[in-house]
Amino acid sequence: MSTLGLFVVAAGLVVIGVALWRARGPYLRSQELRAHRANLERYETWRGGRPALPERGPDSAELMIFELRRQVRLWLAIGGVGLLLVFLGFWLG
């Protein structure tokens, strides 16, 4: 394998590692928000189905989940670029 191929493979692995590390935080936070929301829904069911607040569209937790999901998708796309770099490095090598 050539030096260029090894460099590209190493760069791809670094990009994949950084992308997974950066995607982990928003993913875990979105899971926490979903669990909290499910707990609130169970509480509302326990109260007899009466919502604590009237529905007026998406609440701040839903908007935050959408933003966190966008961040996870962005970092996974960057990880996909890293995977392409790894394949390119093997192809060059």
Image: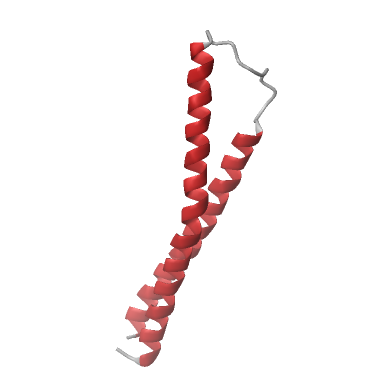
Spot occupied by residue 62 in the image (x, y as percentages of width and height): 60, 35
Q: Residue furthest bottom?
A: 3
56 shown above or below 17: above
Query: Going 48% across and 27% down the picture, which residue do you hit?
Result: 38
Q: Residue furthest left?
A: 1
Query: Going 59% across and 11% down the picture, which residue do you hit?
Result: 50
Total numbered circles: 0
Spot occupied by residue 78 in the image (x, y as percentages of width and height): 50, 64
- Residue 9 is left or right of residue 54, and the answer is left
Q: Quadrant of the N terminus?
A: bottom left
65 shown above or below 84: above
Describe the colour scheme in one phrase.
secondary structure
Front one among 41 and 12: 41
Query: Going 48% across and 20% down the picture, which residue do you hit?
Result: 42
6 shown above or below 32: below
Spot occupied by residue 75 in the image (x, y as percentages of width and height): 51, 59
Query: Going 32% across and 86% down the picture, which residue do you hit?
Result: 93
Instruction: State the image quarter where residue 86 is shown.
Output: bottom left
Instruction: State the image quarter where residue 10 is shown.
Output: bottom left
Q: Residue furthest right?
A: 56
Front one among 13 and 77: 13
Instruction: State the image quarter where residue 90 is shown.
Output: bottom left
Front one among 28 and 6: 28
Front one among 77 and 56: 56
